[in-house]
Structure formats: structure tokens, C-alpha cells
Amino acid sequence: MSDTSFSLAEIRARCAVLPAPAWHRIHDLAAPRHAAILVPLIEVDGVSSVVMTRRTAQMEHGGDWVFPGGRRQTEDESSADTARREAGEELGVDPASIDVIGQLATRGPIDTGYLVEVYVGVVTHPLSMRPDRREVAAVRAIDIAALLVDDRSFRADVSVTRADVVSDYPALRHYSIDGDHHLWGMQADILHEFLHHLTAGRHDF
């Protein structure tokens, strides 16, 4: 698919007509814990981009590229508030500057027991970001048009080896962050869903 530019106004309009969020059930748990993820969007000099973060080495799944998110806290009035708060903490912005504009499919309960709700939000003051260096090793804002180039997305097998798990994941979606790093697995599925809706179904692989 050729690259396509979208203004934030166009993205807001597309998100306003998102279908009701589906539920991608993974495990059956009677009382899952609740978490939320935000797909952050920014616009700088007229270019709309998706913001991704790389986890620090001491974090679970250290070194992975992800969207900001975390577990719901008692002070959160909704899962959207969780997504806004977590993104604010990780990106170092005022949560009030994050405008939630849509909701994607819910995922889980995942292996860690969390049921994850996923939101799309606009960071209205992106130039003031001061990432939390305890959790965030790097931040990348990638032009949406660049993510829609054909060779930016692909499927590949992944092997994960940790002290508590050794797993092979066949043919998972990937998006290239740069030549050496990828967004993959559930995070890539989230990005794919967003881009699929944004392009009215033209983006797929």
C-alpha cells in the first residue's frame, strides 16, 4: 500500500465512527485484573505520528517497543482514565493534555491475567514530553504515512526465552521501528487494528 498522510482532524473523524470495541478473548478467568493501553498520536508541523516507547532493561519484557499503559488504580474513574494517566506518567505529560478520541478492541485476559482495554488519544502538547526514565528507555514518533509503506509491516516467527517461560510464537505481526527493532505481538496487533480502521480496511497483511 502506498503511503498516505492523515491530518489529526481526519483521524478524529475516523475515530468518531469506530465500531463498538470487539473482545479478543485469550484466556478464561473469572476475575481478571484490569489494565489499559493508549495509542498516543501527535501532530508536529502538520505531520501526524504514532508515539511508541521502549521499555527499560529492568522492566518486564525489557527492551520491547510498546504503547504506554498499565493496570487500573482505585483512583481511576474509568479505563480511559487509566490509559490517560499511564501515558501521562510514561511520556511525562499532563494527563489533561491527552484527549481520548476512540476505543479499539479489548484483549485478554492475557497471560499475566489482565483484561486490557485499548484507547486512541491525541497528545495536545507533544513538545513538552519528558519521558519517565525509570520505565522508558526511548521514545519514537513515527509518521503514520511511513507506517503504511508496504515493507514496514510483515509477519515473522518469534522465540521468547526468559527464566519463567520458553515459547515460540508463529507468524506474529511486526512493524519495523528501525532496522534493528520491531513492534510485535499484541502491540503490533493494536497498531494494525488502528491503521486498518484509519484506512477503511485498505491496510492489511
Image (cartoon, grey):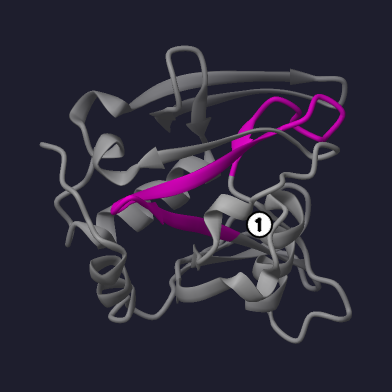
Q: Main secondary structure of the magenta part?
A: strand
For the residue carrying disc 1, how many other residues have a C-alpha within 10 Å: few (<14), some (14-19), or many (20+)?
some
Q: Residue at x 64, y 50 (%)?
A: 129
Q: Name the quadrant of the C terminus.
A: top left
Q: Quadrant of residue 36?
A: bottom right
124 with respect to 46 (left or right): right
Q: Residue at x 16, y 39 (%)?
A: 3
- Number of marks in picture: 1
Q: Residue furthest bottom?
A: 77
Boundaries of the magenta span:
38-66
Q: In this picture, is 150 found above or below 45? A: above
Q: Position of residue 16 (x, y in %)?
A: 32, 81
Q: Position of residue 179 (x, y in %)?
A: 43, 13
Foreground residue among 112 and 56? 56
Q: In this picture, is 131 found above or below 93? A: above
175 with respect to 126 (left or right): left
Residue type at mark 1? His
Q: Residue at x 72, y 44 (%)?
A: 131
Element carrying mark 1: loop
Foreground residue among 172 and 182? 182
Magenta includes 150? no
Magenta includes 40? yes
Q: Which residue is mark 1?
A: 27
Q: Name the quadrant of the N terminus.
A: top left
Q: In this picture, is 147 found above or below 30? A: above
Foreground residue among 165 and 195? 195
